[in-house]
Image (spheres, helix red, strand yellow):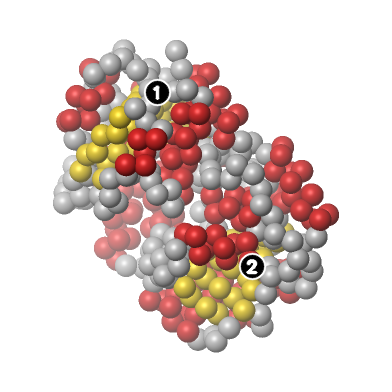
Amino acid sequence: MHIVAFDVPFPADYGGVIDVFYKIKSLHALGVKITLHCFEYGRAEAPELLQYCEQVYYYKRRKYRNPFMGNLPYIVSTRDDETLLENLCKDNAPILFEGLHTTYFIGHSALKERFKLIRNHNIEHEYYKNLEQVETNYFKKYFFRNEADHLKQYEAVIAIANKVLAISPADHLYLNATYKNSVLIPAFHAQDQAQLPSGKGDFILYHGNLGVGENNHAALYLAKSVFPKLKMRCVIAGNNPSDELKKACEAHPHIELHNDWSNEAIMQAIQAAQINVLPTFQGTGVKLKLLNALYNGRFCVVNPTMVKHTGLEDTCIICEQADDMVIAINQYFTLEFDANAAAQRLQVLAKSPYNNQVNAQKLLALLP
């Protein structure tokens, strides 16, 4: 099969490409011969992908385009390389388009008879609308609003696909009600098995790509409304923090901001922390940082939006308000993550829908 990726999916170090990479790896393990197409715009070509793919093609994303010209979403119009269409037409294999981003050619007459899938990582117009709401830069705010409007109109291309693969139950309900062709296939991820630490940690942690608006918003919420009310060491880790977040952290000696940690260092911090605190204010998609914390960390404190309809509600301490988080953190900071807590976590994870092998087989069963 062909897989068209919006970015180079290795290293698998942020949400979207984590799903793409571990999907490729899981399909390869089932014997699927994959031709991978990647749009490259800052991440280097990755020879490691040839371990799992028969062939890998790279295309330059045309990011120099004016984002306010035309009716297509910018994330689509900048991925219109004609060479991609030529390469897709070299055989008749099914095509999986990763995200609306990669679907520029989905309606082309040359692909009319092909079996086509779209992986929806988010309800994109909702995602961009939420990015607009948390953005403070006027130019970016206007871009996100414009992109959300274009994506809402463009989304109708989903009807061209034989199936759309929803990543979360909420997204599946919306897509199936609208287009009648949705199948729920949860996020692929790096966790083959849980590695839960025992005992106690001595700090609490929030991690995420802080250059993404929703993560910056969550980190600011913690730095302004939760962490100042605590006395223990509080750590925020992730690249590209905003100036506002830096100032909020600098105002309190017990709040540390680390923007230079490697993925390995962040994973070690997830395992070492007493509590992973993970609020989100963006309800679409699935937050892979939550799966990382649940498979590798001790206690996990979240807000309702983080776990709604995930099947993971029983693995977390759910807090509606900032003061509720403060109370929960103070309570669980003194407790050991013992064998009983680990067993309860493992029991829920064993029944959860986030099984790479099962989901790869489910995807494979859709193909003609």
Q: Amino acid at mark 1?
A: Lys
Front residue of 156/243: it is 243
Residue at position x 58%, y 31% in the image: 357
Quadrant for residue 87, please give it.
top left
What's under tag 2, amino acid-wise?
Ala
The single residue placed furthest to the right in the displayed view is 340
Is 170 drawn above or below residue 220 in the view shown?
above
| Picture coordinates of residue 110, whole percent (x, y) | 23, 17
Residue of label 2:
273
Is residue 29 positioned above or below 93 on the image? below
Q: Is residue 314 above or below residue 104?
A: below
Quadrant where the image shows the N terminus? top left
Image quadrant where residue 7 sits: top left
Disc 2 packing (10 Å; few <14; some 14–19; many ≥20): many
Q: Evaluate whether residue 217 shows in this view.
A: no
In front here: 68 or 29?
Answer: 29
| Residue labelled with disc 1 | 33
